[in-house]
Image (tube, helix red, strand yellow):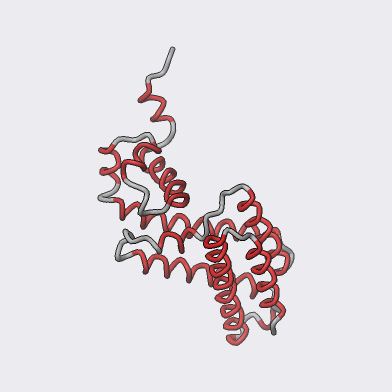
Amino acid sequence: MKKRKGMQTEEKGNPKERLMKAAVDLIYRQGFDATTVNHLIEASETHKASFYRHFQNKGEVGELYLQIQGSSFVQGWKILMAKAESPEQFVRIWVSMLRRQVRRQAYFGCPIARFMTSSEKTPQSPEIAKAILESWYHLFADFFLSFEPKEKQSSRDVQEFCLNKARQFIKIFQGNSQLYVITQNADYFEEMEGELLSILQAK
């Protein structure tokens, strides 16, 4: 028996999940300002009533988008960290992954930085973005700390050293990522790799 369109749509997941899946794709590719509520409704195959049942406005979608992308980066980095036997190997794996995304024309820069350039971001967005950055800093700091001798891991000086190194990592990533977006020159990822490895060599 042929299924009705409504039944097919229902099987694809609940409307909020479909809306956010569409949001993650559209907002990252074309930007938050260029993505309208109607775009999200059409791409997610939902109805306007469903959208406003879950969100008061596009701004709420944007805030959730930020949180999803921030968490996605954390989970992705954790997977790469688990594969790496050293911070240096992690850098090489990470940069190799970024280069593959560029070759597939699937890399449009850091989604958090990209979103924060939007003129339509909500007043709450900077605080959300700040919290995301803090979570990234601490993820990298804990990763670096895990390679320190166990007897030094409880040292505040060592912990602060690892946190500072983590902040430098994110700054280098953001800088080279933005320069790639501006120029479309993938050589910036080679520079990024060299800069990150230099940070790791510093004592």
Q: Quadrant of residue 118?
A: bottom left
Left of 120 or right of it: where is 107?
Answer: right
Q: Residue at x 58, y 67 (%)?
A: 176
| Vertical side of 50 occupied by 194: above or below | below
Horizontally, residue 174 falls left or right of residue 68, namely right
Q: Residue furthest bottom?
A: 157
Residue at 62%, 84% in the rendered image: 158
**Taking 148 as reference, is 110 above or below it?**
above
Image spot of residue 121 (x, y percent): 33, 60
Residue at x 61%, y 52% (from the top left corner): 101
- Locate residue 74: give its quadrant: bottom right
Q: Residue furthest front?
A: 183
Q: What is the residue that sits farthest to the top in this orientation?
A: 1
Q: Quadrant of residue 19?
A: top left
**The one of 135 and 200 positioned closer to us in this rendering:** 200
Quarter of the figure with the N terminus: top left
Up the image or down, 172 lies above or below 69; here it is below
Q: Nearer the viewer, residue 101 or 79?
A: 101
Q: Residue at x 65, y 56 (%)?
A: 99
Residue 8 is situated, as x and y percent measured from the top left of the image, at 41, 26
Relative to the observer, which residue lies in front, 151 or 141? 141
- Assign the C terminus to one quadrant of the image: bottom right
Q: Position of residue 107 (x, y in %)?
A: 56, 53
Q: Is residue 124 left or right of residue 163?
A: left
Percent x, y of residue 17: 40, 42
